[in-house]
Image (spheres, grey):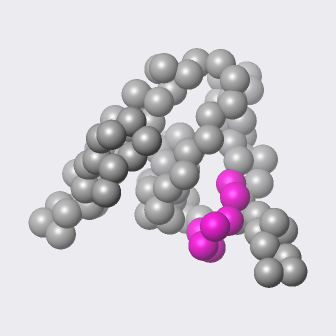
């Protein structure tokens, strides 16, 4: 499998623990945010990655989020901190 830019990294090999996975997600977020410091960023990811990203960005190791398949989530940066706009929005799936 390849991404649009031709690279591919296995998300979570079976031998990795959560701390290593969390570190991988943190590195990816730092990279994305450093390259896109203004405007809107769209990230398409697995539910585990979404939950981990929320915990990292909100600074809470205990924050949990219900992540349904193809649902939408939005955070905004304002006043030096992240704010949740919505979590697990699925209105775009109505009628399917």
Q: Is residue 22 magenta?
A: no
Q: 11 or 81: which is nearer to us?
A: 11
Report the predominant secondary structure element of the magenta stretch.
Answer: loop
Mark yes or no: residue 13 visible. yes
Mark yes or no: residue 55 visible. no
Looking at the figure, which quarter contains the N terminus?
Answer: bottom left
Q: 82 or 61: which is nearer to us?
A: 82
Q: Locate residue 47, reporting x and y percent.
A: 50, 65
Residue drawn at (55%, 65%), measured in percent from left and top?
Answer: 64
Looking at the figure, which quarter contains the C terminus?
Answer: bottom right
Residue drawn at (74%, 26%), measured in percent from left and top?
Answer: 78
Residue drawn at (30%, 41%), measured in percent from left and top?
Answer: 7
Please give the count of numbered marks on the rendered protein: 0
Is 25 drawn above or below residue 17 in the view shown? above
Q: Is residue 41 left or right of residue 61?
A: right
Q: Locate residue 14, reporting x and y percent.
A: 18, 69
Q: Which residues are magenta?
A: 66-73
């Amino acid at each position: 499998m390849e991404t649009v830019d031709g690279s591919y990294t296995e998300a979570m090999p079976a031998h990795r623990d959560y701390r290593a996975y969390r570190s991988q997600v943190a590195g990816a977020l730092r990279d994305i945010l450093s390259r896109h410091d203004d405007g809107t960023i769209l990230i398409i990811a697995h539910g585990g990655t979404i939950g981990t990203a929320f915990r990292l960005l909100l600074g809470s190791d205990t924050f949990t989020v219900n992540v349904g398949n193809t649902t939408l989530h939005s955070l905004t940066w304002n006043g030096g901190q992240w704010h949740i706009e919505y979590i697990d929005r699925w209105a775009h799936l109505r009628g399917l």
